[in-house]
Image (cartoon, rainbow, N blue to C red):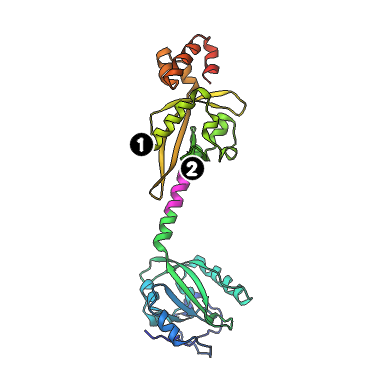
Amino acid sequence: MGFRPKPARVTSAPEARSSTRGKSRPSVSRPEPSAALFKVLANASDVMYTHDGQGNLTWVNGAAERVSGYTRDELLAINILDLLVPEQVEIVRARWARRRQGELPTPVIADITIKDGSRRTLEVGHCLISGDGESSSILHIGRDVTNHERAGRALRESEERFRAFVEQSSDVLSLLDEQGKIIYQSQSIARHLGYVPEELVGLSCFDFVHAEDLETALVGFRQGLEDPSGGNPIVLRLRHKLGHWKSFEAVSSTYVIGGQRAGLLASFRYVGDRLEALDHGDLVRHLGAPQHGDQRAGRVLNQPRERRDLLLE
């Protein structure tokens, strides 16, 4: 591979992408950066190239050959627009127009079609290597981020599926950090407890737990953090925005970010209707800590059936 940039070429008009292949282009005089610089860049691991004002490639390094699958001579007969995926061509043309008006180039993500027909994603930056302001004075530096972009796309799709599941769930779902602060709150909280999710983010989940159930909640929270599979279900009374209490069965499990435990995913299912029909023994088991469960169960069962649900909440 040579180390000096090929003299710039021009075409008579901004013709269609496919029409640039295989045609000879008259050379024009342009200032060239030093050969020593291009000798260093030729062996760089990142894709590097220059092109003229119409997008005709004038110099490429070895990484450009490796990533694209084309030889140097093949690349130098190609317009850069011929490599771009069709949906990005007009975007790039618009960037060139803004550059001619004096706008400085900024980094961009570009998808290209390589010789075998597959796509690669490049993160392309720009470096001014001479001061005349022409496109031939700008060195384009592309880093192959295909795998990173695919992983990111898969993660975004996974997050979208998770969010759709969360938002459509009838249960109240909360993401908590390791101190119990609410990081994310599902929309279903409004239906069950009257709060707008945004007004709870940043608050401690324990601020909404009944005083008699607080010890049970703390024990369950610690168990959830210590056991990746989640602690045992517990029943808690949570405060409605209007001030009354509602009974929920809570289950939790840890969630991990970057291989590190980040906090707890807690799910709260309303069980007031179900508890209203239980006998004394069942109530003791479901109403939380033993020191409170028996007392609460007796108080509930001593009330008329139509009042039990209010006491349970």
Amino acid marked by disc 1: Ser
Q: Which residues are magenta?
A: 154-163
Q: Residue at x 40, y 79 (%)?
A: 61
Q: Residue at x 55, y 84 (%)?
A: 12
Q: Residues within 10 Å of mark 1 (few under 14, many from 20)?
A: few
Q: Which residue is mark 1?
A: 229
Q: Which residue is mark 2?
A: 164
Viewer-proximal residue among 239 and 91:
239
Q: Is residue 192 above or below residue 275?
A: below
Q: Residue at x 53, y 81 (%)?
A: 137
Amino acid marked by disc 2: Ala
Q: Determine the CA span between mark 2 and mark 1.
A: 23 Å
Tell me residue 17's x, y (percent): 49, 75
Q: Residue at x 54, y 83 (%)?
A: 130
User: In the picture, which quadrant includes the N terminus?
Assistant: bottom left
Tell me residue 170's x, y (percent): 49, 32
Q: Which disc, if any, is residue 278?
A: none
Q: Residues within 10 Å of mark 2 (few under 14, many from 20)?
A: few
Q: Is residue 10 above or below residue 209?
A: below
**Main SS of the magenta segment?**
helix
Q: Between tags 2 and 1, which lies in front?
A: 1
Q: Is residue 112 magenta?
A: no
